[in-house]
Structures are given as structure tokens and as C-alpha cells.
Amino acid sequence: MVAAHIATPVTHKKNRRSLANKKGKVVESTIQTTNTDEDITLESLADERTTIADDAQGDDEVMIDVDLESAPIPSVAPLFPTLPPSSAKSTTLKSEIRRVSIPPHRMTPIKKDWIHIFSPLTEVLGLQVRMNMHRRCVEIRTSKHTKDVGALQKGADFIKAYALGFDVNDAIALLRLDDLYLDSFEIKDVKTLHGDHLSRAIGRIAGHDGKTKFTIENASRTRIVLADTKIHIMGSFQNIKVARDAIVSLILGSPPGKVYAGLRTVCSRMKQRAL
């Protein structure tokens, strides 16, 4: 009985070892299965990558192997010849009209110089012109004889220049040249002056017998009209800037001698650039 009682725990220990061995085998089997699953997933991802790379290479090969003769030719923009200025007449369905008002103090001079104003507008630009005494304005209109598209604007600038006080011969230059402009400003735009200070500023701009004004005109190759507190300049863009700077310096109080010296330096630079 004692031996039987002693032998039972041995068998129980053997059972524990067998259970432990069985559990170890189960764990190893699960580890092996997980490893095999990871291997399968990695292999499947590698296979997918290789298939994607093969497909991309296949697409590249397909794009490279395209026959150039069968490919569509890129379209080229058509070239149209330039239209002559005379063709602009056919595009206008009706004539255009422009009215330029004339101030009261220029009504008498325009009556005297009407022939010199009427002739270049009709002969050079081919416009129809009339003087409307009721409205006190000059009306110009395009016709079938109009040669240039911008003839109406040139005619309006010509009449406006004469209305501002420029001579007819100087205003005709606006019809013949394309780079001439008009610029107008007042003395109060530069500096607010009243009374004797304003009259002295106007006197500095005009000079004795108009000497200063003529000097600025000859140096800057412009034409200047001094109408009370308003100043009108006609010329090219660069020349208008030179004349305007000289007049502004005179308005601010600079003596004429200093302005003459500045004009000499500017004229010498302009001559060097021209050469």
C-alpha cells in the first residue's frame, strides 16, 4: 500500500511534463503558423509590387513603341496677312461724331483762322467739319473718305489744342506726328499762392517780354501757353517733363538764372543721348 501510495505522485509528475510538452508544441505550432502567414503576406506584397512594376514597364513599353507616323500631328496656328488701313472703313457701320467746345475768348480767333483749321481736317484726315454757333463747338464726323482709324481723335486733339491757345501751325503738328501730347496744370496744383505772390509767380514763368517762356520752349522743344493761372504744354513725353520741371521750380521761387543752368545741363544730356 505504501508503494502504491508513493508511485502515484510520479505518474502525476509525468503527466505535468507531458502537458508542458504538449503546450510547448502548441505554442511552436502557433508561432510557425504565424510565421508562415507573415511569409505568405510578404510574398503576396512582393508579388503585387512586381506585378505593378511589370505593368508600369508594360505601359512605358506601349507608349514607347507607338508608331510616330500614326501619331496625330500638332496643329499650327494659322498666319493671316495684315489688313490695310483702308479696310477699316468697311468695319464701321455708321459715322462717328465728336464735338469740341470752344471757350468764349477763342470764338473770334477761330473765325479768323477757320480756313487754316478747316483745310487740314478735310484734306489730310478726310473728315467732315462744321462750326455750330448755337452750341459754340466744332463738330467733326467720319466719312467714306476717312483714311485712318484714329483720324477722329487726331482731329479732336487738333481743335482742342487751338482752343487752349496754341497757334494753328503748332497745332497742325499733332496731325502729322504720333508722339505729341498735351499736358495742362494750374499753379495752385504746385503751390497755393494768393495775391501778389501769385502774380510774381506768373511773372517769373513769363519773364521780361516772355524771355523765360521762350527759353524754356527752345531748350525743351515744346510749346507753352500761359493762360492766367493755367499752363498748357505741348510736346513729346520726355520734353514735357523737362519743361514742367523748369516751370515748377519757377513757381516754387527759384531764380531764372538757376533754372537756365539746369536747362543747359539737361539739353547737353539730351544731345549726347541723341548722338
Image: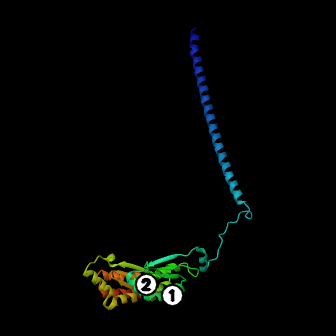
Are circles 1 and 2 on residues that touch, CB within 8 Å?
A: no
Is 209 on the left or on the right of 40, as rendered?
A: left
Q: Residue furthest top?
A: 1
Res 258 → quadrant: bottom left
What is the secondary structure assignment of the residue under circle 2? helix
| Residue 268 x, y percent position in the rendering | 40, 88
- The residue lying toward the viewer, choosing from 167 and 263, is 167
Residue ID at (61%, 32%): 30
Q: Residue furthest front?
A: 134
Q: Residues within 10 Å of mark 2 (few under 14, many from 20)?
A: many
Residue ID at (65%, 46%): 46
Is 226 on the left or on the right of 69, as rendered?
A: left
- Answer with mark 1 or mark 2, whichever residue precedes in sequence: 1
- The residue lying toward the viewer, choosing from 200 and 45, is 200
- The residue lying toward the viewer, choosing from 101 and 195, is 101
Residue ID at (42%, 82%): 163
- What is the quadrant of the N terminus in the image? top right
Residue 223 appears in the figure: no
Instruction: Tell me how far mark 1 sits from mark 2, CA to CA.
Output: 14 Å
Which residue is under mark 2?
162
| Residue 193 x, y percent position in the rendering | 28, 78
Q: Which mark is residue 119?
A: 1
Q: Which mark is residue 174?
A: none
| Residue 249 x, y percent position in the rendering | 32, 81
Residue ID at (53%, 85%): 122
